[in-house]
Amino acid sequence: MPPAVKEFTVAAEHTTPHVEPVISVSTAGRRAELVLSGEIGAAVLRELEQRLDAPALAGAAEWVVDLSGVTRLDLACAYALLRVATQTARPRP
């Protein structure tokens, strides 16, 4: 006799509403500030990388990164942030 098969349904409830991404980069002297909020995912990866590669940021000695408003951070975007944070010398374009 075959074992009894139990069927069940799993429903995932997504409680966080979709929040449009915001990427803000500013510089003051040798200090750069990056503010991210909303859902930072593949849809904004190119924009994030372009902003991180901006010539104005190349000379920053200090970075402030504010992720307090981020509701979701895609792995590729997290890697882009890590890549910039760990570069020792950024060539100027």
Image: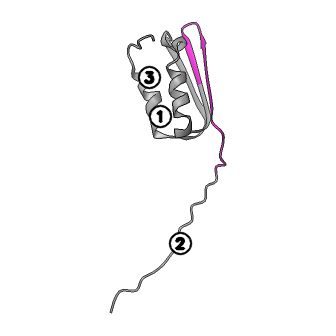
93 is within the stretch colored magenta: no
Mark 1 Cα shell of 10 Å, populated few (<14), some (14-19), many (≥20)? few
Q: Residue furthest top?
A: 29
For marks 1 and 3, give the CA distance. 11 Å
At 41% from the left and 14% from the top, the residue drawn is 90
Q: Earlier in the sequence, mark 3 or mark 2?
A: 2
For marks 2 and 1, give the CA distance. 33 Å
Would you identify the image quadrant in which residue 34 lies? top right
Q: Nearer the viewer, residue 56 or 32?
A: 56
**Which mark is on residue 78?**
1
Q: Residue furthest bottom?
A: 1
Percent coordinates x, y for residue 20 in the rendering? 66, 39
Residue type at mark 3?
Answer: Ala
Q: Which residues are magenta?
A: 16-34
Percent coordinates x, y for residue 55 in the rendering? 51, 12
Whether residue 30 sits left or right of residue 80 in the image: it is right
Residue type at mark 1?
Answer: Ala
**Which mark is on residue 9?**
2
Residue type at mark 2?
Answer: Thr
Mark 2 Cα shell of 10 Å, populated few (<14), some (14-19), many (≥20)? few
At 49% from the left and 19% from the top, the residue drawn is 53
Q: Nearer the viewer, residue 87 or 68?
A: 87
Q: Earlier in the sequence, mark 2 or mark 1?
A: 2
Residue assigned mark 3? 85
